[in-house]
């Protein structure tokens, strides 16, 4: 029996300076590693593949149509909006994702962003190293506003595993946590479920933890931001297209929002003409909430297990 051809189309989205190994996949067939595949080259790269593993590579119908042996797509991520799911289903191609691997790291990054917004650590560090403290007459300076989290209300839009972890951390800071989900839920000691308008009206900090779909796309727009508390903070570690970027820019520049921090954009990587480049009171990180080494290793292990289960006839984490 001939070995399966396994192609990883964007290995550089998972490994950095070979800090983790993808050799685990070699036990299942002939492994081809491609650091990055241009969208125009995807069809050629996967045409002989039995198994394709990818993070953000666009697997459109056009890109998959000549891959006659393709039977399994393993997504090196939780989201799968880069895959033509309907086409894969029509071809009988099994698609499996990797849910839950980044729960801890994304919750951690959410608070890294929030604490930077309200404690101004980078700003104070910069000014100390520029000599400002040395030239100070008193023992301190604190003219950049610092906010205490205790007693503040944090509103979470979406509350899966990541949202629950964020709520736990917020509770540790003695914050009140409101949650809005499409399906609703039962109040607990941790969270109170409310409608979206209540989240916007009552929250000092709004943080997004919902998936990207037709209902959530452009959910945060001019009207949504207008309903938020004056001087509130906004965080997005979910998906870029949930937020209208021009609306976010206006909300910050008008002072409606005191600050915002985001890890995702509508178009990634960031374009030179992005409306959010150099916007005052906005922190942007380059989609790294999921990227600790431990998290990426967990991702690889989970996808390897998905491949193993598929080959044993017991597929798991199946999208189609």
Image (cartoon, rainbow, N blue to C red):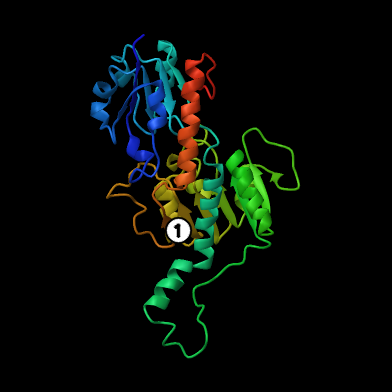
Residue at the top extreme? 1
Instruction: Tell me which corner region of the image, top left, top right, bottom left or bottom right, holds residue 162.
Output: top right
Secondary structure at numbered mark 1: helix
Residue 71 x, y percent position in the rendering: 40, 15
* Residue bearing mark 1: 252
Residue 202 at least partly seen: no
Up the image or down, 157 lies above or below 135; here it is: above
Q: Residues within 10 Å of mark 1 (few under 14, many from 20)?
A: many
- Is 193 positioned to the left or the right of 49 in the image? right
Task: Classify residue 44 as left or right of residue 286.
Answer: left
In this rendering, would 271 be left or right of 212? left
Residue 252 in sight in this render:
yes
| Total count of labels | 1
- Residue 316 location in percent, x, y? 54, 22
Q: Looking at the image, which residue is at 48% across and 36% down? A: 299
In this view, which residue lies farthest toward the bottom?
137
Residue 260 placement (x, y as % from top left): 48, 56
Could you tell me which residue is drawn at 49 percent across and 67 percent down?
120
Image quadrant occupied by the N terminus:
top left
Foreground residue among 189 and 182: 189
- The quarter holding residue 33 reads top left
Q: Is residue 22 above or below residue 225?
A: above
């Amino acid at each position: 029996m001939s070995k399966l051809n396994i192609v990883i189309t964007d290995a550089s989205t998972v490994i950095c300076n070979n800090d983790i190994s993808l050799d685990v996949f070699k036990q299942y067939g002939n492994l081809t590693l491609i650091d990055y595949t241009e969208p125009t080259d995807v069809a050629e790269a996967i045409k002989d593949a039995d198994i394709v593993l990818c993070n953000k590579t666009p697997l459109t119908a056009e890109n998959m149509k000549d891959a006659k042996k393709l039977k399994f797509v393993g997504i090196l991520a939780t989201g799968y909006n880069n895959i033509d799911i309907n086409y894969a289903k029509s071809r009988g191609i099994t698609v499996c994702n990797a849910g839950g691997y980044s729960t801890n790291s994304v919750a951690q990054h959410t608070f890294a962003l929030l604490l930077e917004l309200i404690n101004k650590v980078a700003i104070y560090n910069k000014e100390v190293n520029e000599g400002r403290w040395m030239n100070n007459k008193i023992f301190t300076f604190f003219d950049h506003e610092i906010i205490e989290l205790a007693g503040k209300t944090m509103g979470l839009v979406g509350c899966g595993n990541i949202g629950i972890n964020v709520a736990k951390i917020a509770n540790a800071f003695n914050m009140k946590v409101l949650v809005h989900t499409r399906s609703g839920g039962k109040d607990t000691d941790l969270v109170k479920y409310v409608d979206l308008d209540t989240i916007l009206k009552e929250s000092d900090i709004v943080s997004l933890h919902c998936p990207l779909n037709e209902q959530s796309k452009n959910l945060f727009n001019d009207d949504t931001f207008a309903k938020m508390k004056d001087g509130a903070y906004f965080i997005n570690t979910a998906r870029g297209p949930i937020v209208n970027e021009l609306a976010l820019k206006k909300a910050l520049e008008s002072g409606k929002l005191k600050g915002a921090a985001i890890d995702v954009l509508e178009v990634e990587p960031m374009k030179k003409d992005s409306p959010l480049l150099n916007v005052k009171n906005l922190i942007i990180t380059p989609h790294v909430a999921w990227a600790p080494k431990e998290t990426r290793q967990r991702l690889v292990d989970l996808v390897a297990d998905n491949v193993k289960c598929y080959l044993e006839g017991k597929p798991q984490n199946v999208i189609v």
